[in-house]
Amino acid sequence: MNSFLDWAASNDYLLMWLLYLLGVVGLLIVAWRLTRSWPRWLSVSLRFLGACLLLVPALVDKDKELYAPALVVGPFEWLSKSPEHAEPAISALIFWTGIALIVIVIAQLASHFLRRQSSTRQSSEPEAGAATE
């Protein structure tokens, strides 16, 4: 047991990230269950945006290269120091949320196009079969 405590004390940064990621996975599972009855485009979009916001890291200590969730670092730096100190975390959140929105729009357009193409293909197949008989 003592060796585990020594290991945990030397790797507290990794343990913090592990616990945070387990919490995020739990939260995303709950979000998945809550949004399963919503329209597909809305539920998938919100799940993806939620994952993006929860998983974006921000640099906390430049000397040690320590990262923490930007959703936590941004407000903490804003309230404890000044808005200038929160800019890196907030800009990372805005940047990655913008990328996520672009990915969502492209995925939704592709899904809509593929569904539309599939439905026109299915509706034209019976007509082609009737014409050959």
Image (cartoon, helix red, strand yellow):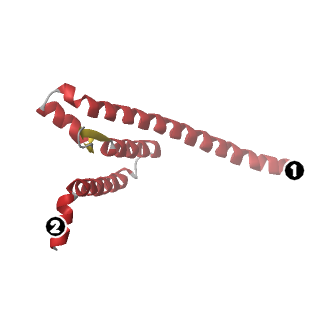
Secondary structure of the residue carrying numbered label 2: helix
Relative side of 70 to 100, left or right: left
Q: Are marks 1 and 2 in contact (CB under 8 Å)?
A: no
Question: What percent of the width, then of the height, locates residue 21?
Answer: 30, 54
Q: Residue furthest front?
A: 63
- Mark 1 closeness class: few <14, some 14–19, many ≥20 residues within 10 Å: few
- The answer to whether residue 70 is seen in the rendering is no
Q: Quadrant of the N terminus?
A: bottom left
Amino acid beneath label 2: Leu
Q: Residue at x 17, y 65 (%)?
A: 6
Q: How many numbered discs, if any?
A: 2
Q: Residue furthest bottom?
A: 1
- Mark 2 closeness class: few <14, some 14–19, many ≥20 residues within 10 Å: few
Mark 1 sits on what residue? Answer: 132
**Residue 65: quadrant of the picture:** top left
**Residue 29: quadrant of the picture:** bottom left
Q: Residue at x 46, y 34 (%)?
A: 102
Q: Residue at x 13, y 30 (%)?
A: 81
Q: Residue furthest top?
A: 84
Q: Residue furthest left?
A: 80
* Label 1, label 2: how far apart the Cα atoms are: 77 Å
Mark 2 sits on what residue? Answer: 5
Closer-to-camera residue (67/2): 2
Closer-to-camera residue (56/43): 56
Relative side of 77 to 124, left or right: left
Closer-to-camera residue (50/92): 92
Question: What percent of the width, then of the height, locates residue 87?
Answer: 25, 28
Amino acid beneath label 1: Thr
